[in-house]
Image (cartoon, coloured by chain):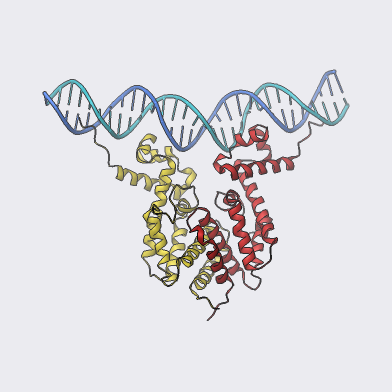
Chain colours: A yellow, B red, C blue, D cyan
DNA sequence: GATGTTATATAACAATGCTAGACTATCTGT
DNA sequence: ACAGATAGTCTAGCATTGTTATATAACATC
């Protein structure tokens, strides 16, 4: 009555996510095709669809691991603005395609402000929020926006690469200074 | 000896760009297929390839018009930080798919720092730069990054929509205050 | 008009995401 | 042990995409 045992779906999901992430980081997201992914894992395409409903769902899952990882990267350093901001930018620079999946690629991930926002997303924002304990959420959102802008514009080569440190310094100063008026 | 006259290529390029931009703004970039575009213009696909070498080249051309337009939008308001910043965010919010083509989609456009950076791109940055005449380029780059981060995170619904004005105010204050130390 | 050149259209190619149906491996019940 | 049922996997295919080779049709010159 009981059929062939189900393979460890969670394990397989992890393997697929890992392979997709590596492949994207190596050759870019357009190279992450279901066929190539399946070939790399030694299975056929339909197997991937037992783990993920669509390619989009897979990309979303990869993005989610990215949010977990960047949250961990933030929590791993001091809760000071400078340390957290640097950690954020370092992460984005070290994993450009992953960061792309998190923010630039079309995404089915739920958003901030809703209760169904995935936990990793909330943890990542909390990692930034925690660097500005005396500020309000608005300031933390501006900080996040500045970091995100710096990360993406720098990644696309639209800012002078040699002035990255100066930009970080300036942004950090601006965000930590109290209003004077 | 003389062949059939070449159609006005520049005119056709403009028409294609316009159609692609409208279609993208209406139904998103994935809906902008060469077939649908051709059908909308009453021609067949190969004709599009006489105007643009590839779909990517077409998207790049659309993005370039976006940079021209945002530059014009910036130049149309006072050179004050607040006016320019608001104009930038308004533009991004009013043309989300166009802004997507300019910054989020894969792009073949050349980058800042090189002499071959397209003029519209330089003009757009100059529009931001002009709002901070007393500051250095580094501050202008940080301003641009903050604006870009605000625009994209807001567009993807990752910031509290009701606090957009507060974020703009805060960002503006931070960027205009002099260092105090 | 006839001719030759070139813009356009037809039709096809290769690759993609995704899926229906055939096959096969495994566990259960006797 | 062995047969049967169940569910995972594979083969093969569909529809759609960007892009292009070939054939057709339109136009300016003579």
Residue B69 versus residue B128 in the image, above or below: above
State the residue at coordinates (50%, 75%).
Answer: A177
How many circles with numbers are drawn on the protein? Answer: 0
Q: Position of residue A143 (x, y in %)?
A: 49, 65
Q: Quadrant of the C terminus of chain A?
A: bottom right
Q: Quadrant of the N terminus of chain A?
A: top left
State the residue at coordinates (61%, 52%).
Answer: B94
Displayed quadrant of residue C1: top right
Residue closest to the eye, B122 or A136:
A136
Residue closest to the eye, B36 or A135:
A135
Left or right of residue A118: residue B11: right
Residue B8 seen in the figure:
yes
Q: Position of residue A149 (x, y in %)?
A: 53, 60
State the residue at coordinates (36%, 44%).
Answer: A16
Q: Position of residue A160 (x, y in %)?
A: 58, 63
State the residue at coordinates (67%, 43%).
Answer: B18
Residue A167 versus residue A4 in the image, above or below: below
Residue B102 versus residue A75 in the image, above or below: above
Residue A153 seen in the figure:
no
Q: Position of residue A86 (x, y in %)?
A: 45, 66
| Residue that extends furthest to the bottom in the rendered view of this protein | B181
């Amino acid at each position: 009555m009981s059929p062939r045992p189900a393979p460890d779906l969670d394990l397989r999901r992890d393997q697929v996510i890992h392979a997709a992430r590596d492949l994207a980081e190596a050759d870019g997201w357009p190279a992450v095709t279901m066929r190539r992914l399946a070939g790399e894992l030694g299975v056929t395409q339909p197997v991937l669809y037992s783990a993920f409903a669509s390619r989009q769902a897979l990309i979303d899952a990869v993005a989610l691991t990215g949010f977990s990882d960047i949250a961990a990267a933030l929590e791993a350093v001091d809760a000071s603005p400078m340390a957290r901001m640097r950690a954020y930018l370092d992460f984005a620079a070290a994993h450009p395609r992953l960061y792309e999946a998190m923010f630039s690629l079309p995404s089915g991930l739920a958003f901030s402000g809703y209760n169904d926002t995935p936990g990793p997303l909330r943890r990542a924002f909390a990692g930034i929020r925690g660097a500005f304990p005396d500020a309000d959420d608005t300031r933390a959102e501006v900080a996040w926006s500045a970091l995100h802008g710096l990360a993406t514009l720098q990644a696309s080569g639209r800012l002078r690469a040699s002035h990255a440190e100066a930009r970080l310094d300036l942004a950090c100063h601006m965000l930590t200074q109290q209003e004077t008026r």
